[in-house]
Each structure stands twice: as C-alpha cells, then as structure tokens.
Amino acid sequence: MVSQFNVPATIISGGGASQDVGRQLLRLGATRVLLVTDAFMIASGVAEKVTAELERSGLPFAVFGGVQPDPTDADVREGLAALRRLQGDAIVALGGGSPIDAAKAIAVLAKNPEPLSLYQGYHKVPLAGVPVVAIPTTAGTGSEVTKVAVITDTARDVKMMMLDRHFLPTVALIDFELTLSMPPALTAHVGVDTLTHGIEAYVSSKATALTDPLALTCIRLVAEHLETAWREPSNRAAREGMMLAATLGGMAFANSSVALVHGMSRPIGAVFHVPHGLSNAVLLPAVTRFSLSGAKERYATVAKTMRLCSSDLGTEPACEALVTGLVELNRRLNVPRLGECRGVERARFDSVVAKMAEDALASGSPQNNPVVPAADQVIELYRQAF
Ligand SMILES: [Fe+2]
C-alpha cells in the first residue's frame, strides 16, 4: 500500500507556546492577519491574549469572531469576506475544532474557486491557500495538525468532510495552558473524541507503520490523563498529557483515517446539532463492539495500551475488556446516551435514522472500518446507542 503522510511544517508545543504567534507570522512573511475565532473565545478573554501578541508584533489585523459550533458554509463565506476586506494574507485560527476548521476552509477559498462543496471528499483542492497558524484551545479535535476540515453544507444539511494537504495549517502552536479553564463536561467529550481518533486510526484499514506509534501513544496518554483532567481542571500534567494526546491523535487519523464512529457521528451533528466530541463519545462503545471481529489483535492491543487488562491476557478476553472499559469510562465521565443528548427526540430520530445511515455510509469513513457495515447495521447501531 502506498500512503501519504502530512503534518504541519512547524509544531511548537509546551506551556506558553501560543505567545509565539507574532513571531511565527512574521517568519511566514505575513503582512495583514485575520484572527478567526468564536464568540466564546472572545467572551472568555482568550482571544484578547492572542490579539495582544499580534499588537506586539506590529502586524495589522482584524478579528472575525462569528464562527458557530458546527461551522457552516455561510460562516466560511462571512470569514472570507472579512479576509478580503482586510486584504489579509495570513490567518490565525483560535479555538476548538469549529473555528480551526472554518479558518482552514477560509484559507483555501482565498486562493481557490467557490463553492466550498467542490472540495468535499479527498484531494480535490488545486492550489495552496493562505498560511494558517492554528492555536487549539480544547484538547480534542486535533484539527490544528490535520489536513481535514468538516463544514456543514446548509443547502443539503450535510457535514462535508474535506481532506487535502492544502487544508493543513502551516504552524500549530500547542499550548496546554489554554485548556486549564475548560469545563469538565467539555473535557470529557473532547477527551473521548481524542481517544476515538487514536483507536480509529489504529484499527483503520488505512493504518500504516508511520501512524501506529502516534495512535498508540495517543491512546496511552488519554488512558493516563483524561479522568484526572476531568476531575482536576487545573492539573497541569494531566492537561499537558491530553493536549499531546489530541495532537498525536490528529496526526494519526489524518494520515490513516477515522472510521465508523466518525462516519456515524457527523449525521448526528448535522441533524441534531450534538457537538462533535459528544456524538463520538456516545457511539464509541457500541461501534467498538460491532467492529471487534475485523481487527481482534489490534483491539486487544488497544485494551492493553489502556491498561484495561493484563498484558498477557488472550485476544478474545482483552477485546471484551476493551468494550467493558469503554462503557465504564463513559459512565464515570457522565457521558449521556444518544437519546439523552439535548435536542435529540425519539420521534425525529425514528424519522431520520435511515437518512443518517445513508449519509454516514456516503461519507467514506465507514469503508475504512475493520468491519464494513450495511445500511441496516448502521441503523441498528444508532438504535443501540440511543
Ligand atoms: Fe473527532
């Protein structure tokens, strides 16, 4: 199998790394910069820390703070207009996966024709966009190091998955200090999303020798640090461990692939607006149970890496220990069931579940799963998670 491996040209990590933003932009030759972020980053004062650094650098800049959770093509068009008004030639992306994905799409559209839907799928972007310096504030999506952007196409109500090396940020500033104020529920949801990245990258049919060590280290770090970060938000070692896990998981899945959990998760987000991390977390145990038979050895290794069983346990019982461990982890972190998530109603679920299964399969991700499901099996998995 021939595979391609891309990561940002520069990754700077450690407490305070985000303060390097001005210097990195100047190094890239930026002259006018758009900061792309969301209302929460502005209200919480995190955006101000970054704009203070931009002021220090002397670079003219503008702020586009209008990215919504589950960003849409409309958000991207608005951000692109802001970039054009500024005549900007670089973007700083600040926040969770939503502002970073939106920023990556704005950067691509700055140098490529619209509409954004032209780039849905794999390797469809002709030209490099403007450079993006990405600063993640949640230890979760890994978007700062991936060549993937997920943007909702409002006309079709579909979360478009776009993968191309031109979506890759040029610089990632990985600063765990920005996650110290993350609330426990968000910590749990994006943390299980990170775990899902590690597991899916490792069991994917596209896993390679380059992605396996990244995926396994991601999994180990989540097992070691997630519950401490959730219980003790200001625990620096736990926050740093989760931030590194998110970065490693992002590097792994972007160069291997995600699989059935993410494929099924996107329609939940598109229809019910359940946040990405949460929609993955509610699916992970059931989808793992369904997928075991296609990659038993690998799932057993995941269980052992998470220390859910002894290292000499046989493959079958180790797989069982993994499913039990994932169910228990969700329970301890208070992850709800799908039917308990805000906005998810039984009647609407029943009426859209077949379309959700269709959209999940159409996204391409389930085809990388150890067991590739048929539509009726996807529907059954949604029902199990409900
Ligand atoms: Fe994810």
Image: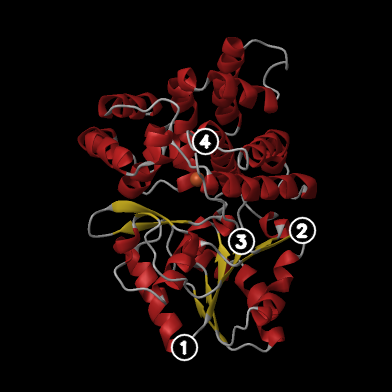
Q: Name the amino acid type tagged 2.
A: Gly
Q: Is residue 331 above or below residue 66?
A: above
Q: Residue drawn at (43%, 21%), measured in percent from left and top? A: 290
Please say whether residue 199 is visible from this viewpoint: yes
Percent x, y for residue 18? 70, 67
Please rate how many residues cluster around mark 4, counting C-alpha atoms within 10 Å: few if below 14, some from 14 to 19, many from 20.
many
Please rate how many residues cluster around mark 1, counting C-alpha atoms within 10 Å: few if below 14, some from 14 to 19, many from 20.
some
Residue placed under numbered mark 2 in the picture = 14
Q: Name the amino acid type tagged 3.
A: Pro
Q: Earlier in the sequence, mark 1 or mark 3?
A: 3
Please rate how many residues cluster around mark 3, counting C-alpha atoms within 10 Å: few if below 14, some from 14 to 19, many from 20.
some
Label 4 beta carbon less than 8 Å to ligand 1: no
Residue placed under numbered mark 1 in the picture = 87
Q: Are marks 1 and 3 in contact (CB under 8 Å)?
A: no
Separation of residues labelled 1 and 3 (CA atoms):
24 Å
Q: Nearer the viewer, mark 3 or mark 4?
A: 3
Q: Earlier in the sequence, mark 4 or mark 1?
A: 1
Residue placed under numbered mark 3 in the picture = 8
The image quadrant of residue 59 is: bottom right
